[in-house]
Image: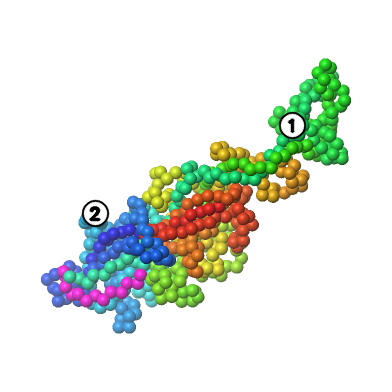
Amino acid sequence: MKIKGLLLGMLAYAAMVACTNEDIVKNNVNQPEKVKGNLSLVISSTSNSSRAADNEESGVTDPGIEGESTVTDAVIILNRLDENGNLTKEEFGGYLTKAQLNETTASGETIYNPFFTLANSGWYKVLVVLNPTESIEAIANSQQSTDKSKYEQIAESSYTTTGDITIAAAGQFMMVNKKEIKVDVLSNNYEEPTIEEVEVERVVSKINYVVAKPNNLYPLTVQTTDYAIAETTSGYYIYPDNKAVRLTGLHKAKNLDNDNSDVWIHEGTDGTDRRAFIKTEKTYGQTGEHIFTLLEPFPKFEYYTTSTDGKLDWTVKLDKYALVNLSNSVYTARHLTDASWENFRTLGLLGVDNMAYMVDPNSKNKNNVTDYDQVFGSYFYNALKNVNADKVDEASDDSQVYFQDLPTANTDINDNEQVGHRLAYCLENIVKKEKQVPALVTGIIFRGQIGDETGEPVGTIYKCNNKFYTSIDAVKADNGADASYDTYENGHCYYYSSEICHNKGDQYMDKAIMRNNIYVLKVTGFENIGGATITIDPSGEESDNNFYLQLNAKIIPWIVRFNNIEF
């Protein structure tokens, strides 16, 4: 996230608790003796770090696109701490409108200078929320007394959606400080306030796609068997009224209903009026061609064929994608826990004070799931089971079409070329390491169109015993009449990955989605044709070794995580 140089001079605004009008002097430089504390907050994005990649940093940052860094309003809460360092009901700050932010520019950077005066010096906790939701605004503006401070209410609040993420709307990206901020306000000098820097980050995440091959077209070689009809002839059939018709394209076959005796199959003009004939010794006139008699009923048959094993150069064009298990809720402020999932805290960094995981509002419940086949509608707005049943081009769940068109070129992209096209904004999704299975983690499905070496679609194809065929007759000729096979309707195949990794191989935050990160997906290649249908084992046990993605990750703040995908 990039919000550079956002300056909020913080000195007495509005909402206060346990203070009288005599305790606060607003903008009164003529009465400095009444001013006990002055504070300025310098609010900025996460800095570009050169540290080795870990769960917090990648060493790579991205400023994002227009609208992802705009600030329209804010809620800032200062909660005074008692002598034991505990939150009190003595709070200052509140909701700040666009006008109150007093926007200016300096050296090309946007600066905001609202001005406040604090009644008292001492230690304060600071909570900054930029572009807050209406519910957060309501808490900040409330005059009602509650058991919890406004600081606690806002920090512990959460946001829920059914798919339209309003806190990721252009110009409305909600941002919150990432670390716990404690500041000792000492200055009573109006012109030289205590200064504290606050890092803020976007609450949402982003999944992007970079086109690796022109038009998403990937070459690959498949094992196949090429079949040809062994013998084809022509002849005559004489109707009962003695009308004779010449038949071409009579294919020799075995009559499986009559001890493999010879039968000749005429496919007709379009393959729908197929008939069977018996060859006689009689010939028709001076043609020398044999006369054939009609065989009814139509028998089970098997063509006499010649076969050649070989390989074909085909292609797969990725044309659609569906994201799986996008979380429906997120905490306003960071929530973290240790490896035991027994000790929790609000705000802070991973790896500090034994904090191992980020936490989303559903993390605890997801960790307790044992039946991976259930629908996780309470956790996600596109649960794995729903997408598994999708018809790709049809609405199959509450009028939801999960598959969208995949970008085909790195032009007109909404981010820079390095981070590619945005597929979706999303919310944090975290579970403990042993629960990072397809049913619970965020994943992606790609649809591919199988084509010849030029990319021209090959139509419906079939797979049997790891070989591909262009007809069912070829399947049965090579594998027997009762062979089972997979049908690739219209030449479509599917690839899936549950490995959209935050920090690949990490003992905690491996397959996870974390706020203020961009997860960039890039398909580097395939080993084979994907699955014929969308069938994903929610427990993570792959039934088809070809039906997977491998993702590698880096990070950008936005912190970007690059994921190279290989099928």
- Which range of residues does the magenta coloring cover? 179-191
Q: Which residue is drawn at 50% across and 45% down?
A: 216
What residue occupies the far top of the structure in this picture? 286
Q: Name the residue under label 1.
A: 267
Locate residue 558, reporting x and y percent: 37, 58
Q: Which of 138 and 354 is in front in this view?
A: 354
Please report whichever mark, 2 or 1, sits nearer to the chain's N-terminal start. Answer: 2
Describe the element under mark 2 as helix, strand or loop. loop
Q: Quadrant of the rendered structure where residue 5 is?
A: bottom left
Q: Name the residue under label 2.
A: 108
Report if residue 393 is visible in the image.
no
Which amino acid does the dot numbered 2 rest on?
Gly
User: Most prominent secondary structure in the magenta stretch?
Assistant: loop
Q: Distance between the residues labelled 2 and 1?
A: 75 Å
Report if residue 155 is visible in the image.
yes
Which amino acid does the dot numbered 1 rest on?
Glu
Describe the element under mark 1 as helix, strand or loop. loop
Marks 2 & 1, CB-CB < 8 Å contact: no
Color style of the picture: rainbow
Quadrant containing the N terminus is bottom left
116 horizontally vs 239: left or right: left
* Magenta stretch encompasses residue 431: no
How many residues crowd mark 1 within 10 Å: few (<14), some (14–19), many (20+)?
some
